[in-house]
Amino acid sequence: MAFIHHTTMTPTKLELLTDWLPKQSWYAGSPKGPELVKAGGFRLDDPEGAVGIEFMVVVDTGTPEPVAYLVPMGYRGAELEGAPGEALIGPSEHGVLGTRWIYDGVHDPVVTAQLHALLRGEATPQRQSENNTPDPTVTVYRTGHGSGLDVQLNRVLRQAEGSQQQSGCLVAGWTWPDGTSARGVFATVAPQHEVVRPA
């Protein structure tokens, strides 16, 4: 079970993402770079206790209309062997754990395995900033499938009405800068090969 340390990270996750996001093909903000605020998300536990797993929502307030992004992240105590260069969001010095290598979750096998487990109903989403506290706001609309899952993450999040929610999807929430709440589809599922690909 993951333990959340309330301590410093240097650089912070938002600082790392401010540099990393504009390099992604799905980035929808200004060429000058985003102005990010943390807006929501949830965590999953690594059964082995080695990798921190967070699905973070950040909102770019530097655009005419705020844009919400979903960034799954794997926090590791050592570099991930065989990961492509673009997988690394960046290293950060954790106030308790030392150097942590933060990876884009779509390239981290532990993150993708636990996402699949969540979508199969075999993992419990946890609150983002509380230890051992399930997050009941994260909803999986399950559908019949075999052992393989073809999962597509929605990197740019859009608010979804209840009628838009469908079987085979993961729905969760975030908060806009003006304080209003939103919910949307974080991921969709089809019974195909077991792979997570970025949108």
Image (tube, rainbow, N blue to C red):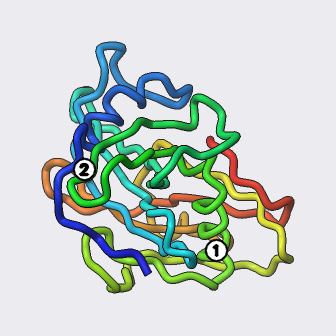
Q: Mark 1: which secondary structure?
A: helix
Q: Residue 54: x, y in percent?
A: 42, 61
Badge 2 crowding class, 10 Å Cα cut-off, few under 14, some 14 to 19, many 20 or more, is some
Please report contact status of discs 2 and 1: CB closer than 8 Å, yes or no.
no
* Kind of residue indicated by mark 2: Lys
178 left or right of 154?
A: left
Front-most of 99 and 57? Answer: 99
Q: Which residue is mark 2?
A: 38
Instruction: Tell me the residue at 58%/60% (across/down).
Output: 111
Question: Quick one: SS at disc 2?
Answer: strand
Q: In the picture, which quadrant includes the N terminus? A: bottom left
* Residue 115 shown left or right of residue 20 in the figure: right
Pointer 1 local density, CA inside 10 Å: few below 14, some 14–19, many at least 20: many
Q: Position of residue 118 (x, y in %)?
A: 59, 76
Residue 26: x and y in percent read 53, 31
Could you tell me which residue is drawn at 38 percent across and 85 percent down? 134
Question: Which label was assigned to residue 142?
Answer: none
Q: Earlier in the sequence, mark 2 or mark 1?
A: 2
Q: CA distance from mark 2 to mark 1?
A: 24 Å
Quadrant location of the C terminus?
Answer: top right
Q: Is residue 186 above or below residue 23?
A: below
Residue located beneath label 1 in the image: 119
Q: Is residue 42 above or below residue 78?
A: below
- Residue 113 is situated, as x and y percent measured from the top left of the image, at 66, 66
Residue at the farthest left position: 178
Q: Residue at x 66, y 57 (%)?
A: 109
Residue 60 lies, with reference to residue 133, above or below; the image says: above
Taking depth in this image into account, of 186 and 121 the one nearest to the observer is: 121
